[in-house]
Amino acid sequence: MLVTLGLLTSFFSFLYVVAPSIRKFFAGGVCRTNVQLPGKVVVITGANTGIGKETARELASRGARVYIACRDVLKGESAASEIRVDTKNSQVLVRKLDLSDTKSIRAFAEAFLAEEKQLHILINNAGVMMCPYSKTADGFETHLGVNHLGHFLLTYLLLERLKVSAPARVVNVSSVVHHIGKIHFHDLQSEKRYSRGFAYCHSKLANILFTRELAKRLQGTGVTTYAVHPGVVRSELVRHSSLLCLLWRLFSPFVKTAREGAQTSLHCALAEGLEPLSGKYFSDCKRTWVSPRARNNKTAERLWNVSCELLGIRWE
């Protein structure tokens, strides 16, 4: 008994000593650029909470005019008020944007373009994860509709403003789970078979394929684009999964905070010299490996064309 007690005491003493190092390791990379953003305009989707909110806070602290584009305007106003006080930047604005409804996306874009003559950074951050099967207002499976098609349409509608503001950047928040994603063109809306876990993975693969094809089409425009994996982050994204909520609590020392999760988005939005890496995938503030499916140019082009057809747009 005494031996067991001694071993347990030694074990927990060891954990206490090494905990800061473990925590630092799992915190991941840090955006270290000192770039300031006075006069720059930024749009961040889903910035009323989590990673998006911390991204907005940092960009506002650097002097940018930041638009929080979100479905829940009340939460958005609460986040914006907090950020204004924290950063002493009054130019943090909230606008309604529901990515599950193309009418809302078009209304947001129309109002923004009437209000702003420039757009320097677009961060497609919002997303849903592991939702029960459902469809958007336009009949798209929710993960595909919100995580991919919603941001695809938003980028299309804002692209000319990004071009006239060049150099400009588009950052798409994806995930490491794209490695187990697949684009099922024969069942894109998951009507034949649905798994809410895999549906999320498929949509994150779509984010990377979109980034890849977008970079190819943007060559020579001064607009560059990047896909990012923020890491395993404590956020509201896991709210649809009781198991993940429990795991996040049990392993909280190994899970990133929202601020830590925002670092790679910030790196890709701000770091100097990233232009040659347009279309690439980043994690912990550095370029990292993607799955073979995410490197398939034919799939990327086909997904682009199918997305245009579904949305009823012509994007040459």
Image (tube, helix red, strand yellow):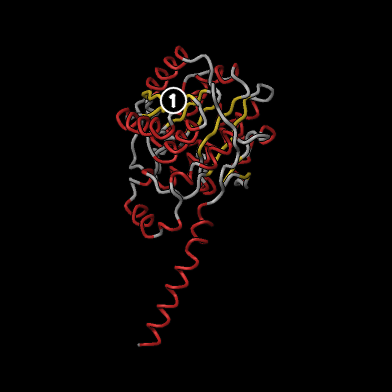
Q: Is residue 8 above or below residue 181?
A: below
Decide: few, some or many residues near mark 1? Use Cα within 10 Å; few <14, some 14-19, many ≥20: many
Q: Secondary structure at mark 1?
A: strand
In this picture, residue 180 sits left or right of residue 316? left
**Residue in the image at 44% along x and 54% along y:** 255
**Residue in the image at 65% along x and 34% along y:** 272
- Image coordinates for residue 21, horizontal then vertical, percent: 52, 61
- Image coordinates for residue 91, horizontal then vertical, percent: 43, 23
Which residue is most to the front? Answer: 88
- Image coordinates for residue 82, horizontal then vertical, percent: 36, 34
- Image coordinates for residue 141, horizontal then vertical, percent: 39, 34
Q: Which image quadrant is residue 290 in?
A: top right
Can you identify the residue that label 1 sits on?
A: 67
Q: Which image quadrant is residue 106 in?
A: top left
Q: Is residue 308 above or below residue 276?
A: above
Q: Is residue 172 above or below residue 282?
A: above
In this picture, residue 198 sits left or right of residue 164? left
The answer to which of 228 and 252 lies nearer the viewer is 252
The answer to which of 192 and 120 lies nearer the viewer is 120
Q: Quadrant of the C terminus?
A: top right
Q: In the rendered structure, which amino acid carries the disc numbered 1?
A: Tyr
Q: Quadrant of the N terminus?
A: bottom left
**Residue in the image at 48% along x and 24% along y:** 65
Which residue is most to the left? Answer: 74
Q: Is residue 134 above or below residue 289?
A: above
